[in-house]
Amino acid sequence: MPSIIAVKNLRKTFGTFTAVDGISFTVQKAECFGLLGPNGAGKTSTIRMLYGYSPASDGELYLFDQLINNDWRTVKNRIGVCQQEDNLDPDLSIRDNLLTYARYFNLSKSGARQITDRLLKFFALENRAKTNIRELSGGMKRRLVLARSLINQPDLLILDEPTTGLDPQSRHQVWERLEELKNAGLTILLTTHYMEEASRLCDRLVIMNQGRILVEGRPQELIQHYVGREVIEISPPSPKLLSYLKNHGLRFENLGQRLVIHNQADAGLFTLLTELFGDLRCTLRPATLEDVFLHLTGRELRE
């Protein structure tokens, strides 16, 4: 099957600093593909090369089975981009923001109006169409930026942290719309810091760190491989518990006031630990993509 995106040994350097260090991946048609990683991992640098904002330092980048520098104008017309920044025109209404943006794609006036009306309805903004941008909530602005990225009816939608800063209700509204778009056959490339978002939307994903890809796969497969089905959390860990785990060769992560056990070899380990160390707070919960992320990239804060 022809790929929508094919990245081969892609590199991006800024002077002596390497932001993206020889990564490779492909994205298939109608797939939602995620780029995950801590701050500074190279996610945004990667997608900026994909939509032509920043040239690659080295490597090959194919969109729709052609090198992007061969016919970049044609390629751009098939891409929709939702950037992190709110770059809406504050002097225009919701509707006029969409109609003005449509001019960049040489849409007819009637065609632009039809698409605008459809997108306003799809993102539940039709009742606020004449409202000035300055009067909108953060959630409405984000839905409008998403709507604008679809004005040219793209074959590929690139989303750079589309729900950052939104309240839970607004975030779930955006997720529902993105799921509808994916189910309709739109290919989506997504960067996000929300592991729940990645688990819910992404068919496949990569986790990046320091410009390189650490792992690639389906969310549930990565969880099962790196963490297991369940996680045991114990707080606070006592010296007696630590000694028991070490003596029995059990792998764990000691976080000071909390201890985490992944990939339990014994299905009855939780029951055994609660019986032996009943004075401790011991919790059994489902493993998540966030467990994988922290396991692979570490828990220290990044600038």
Image: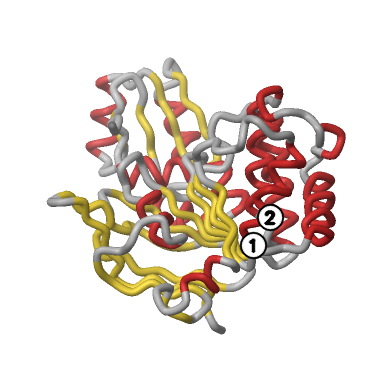
Q: Nearer the viewer, residue 166 or 287?
A: 166
Q: Is residue 7 above or below residue 118?
A: below
At mark 1, the secondary structure is: helix
Q: On the picture, is 36 further left or further right than 183?
A: left
Badge 2: residue crowd in 10 Å (few <14, some 14–19, many ≥20) = many
Q: Is residue 268 visible?
A: no
Q: Is residue 275 visible?
A: yes
At mark 2, the secondary structure is: helix
Disc 1 to disc 2: CB gap under 8 Å: yes
Q: Is residue 125 above or below residue 254?
A: below
Badge 1: residue crowd in 10 Å (few <14, some 14–19, many ≥20) = few
Q: Residue at x 61, y 30 (%)?
A: 166
Q: Which residue is mark 2?
A: 102
Q: Residue at x 41, y 46 (%)?
A: 292
The percent position of residue 182, horizontal first and vertical second, equals 68, 60
Which quadrant is the N terminus positioned in?
A: bottom right
Whole-angstrom CA distance, mark 1 to mark 2, is: 6 Å
Q: Amino acid at mark 2?
A: Ala
The percent position of residue 216, horizontal first and vertical second, equals 41, 62
The disc placed on residue 105 is: 1
Q: Nearer the viewer, residue 262 or 212?
A: 212
Q: On the picture, is 284 further left or further right than 172?
A: left
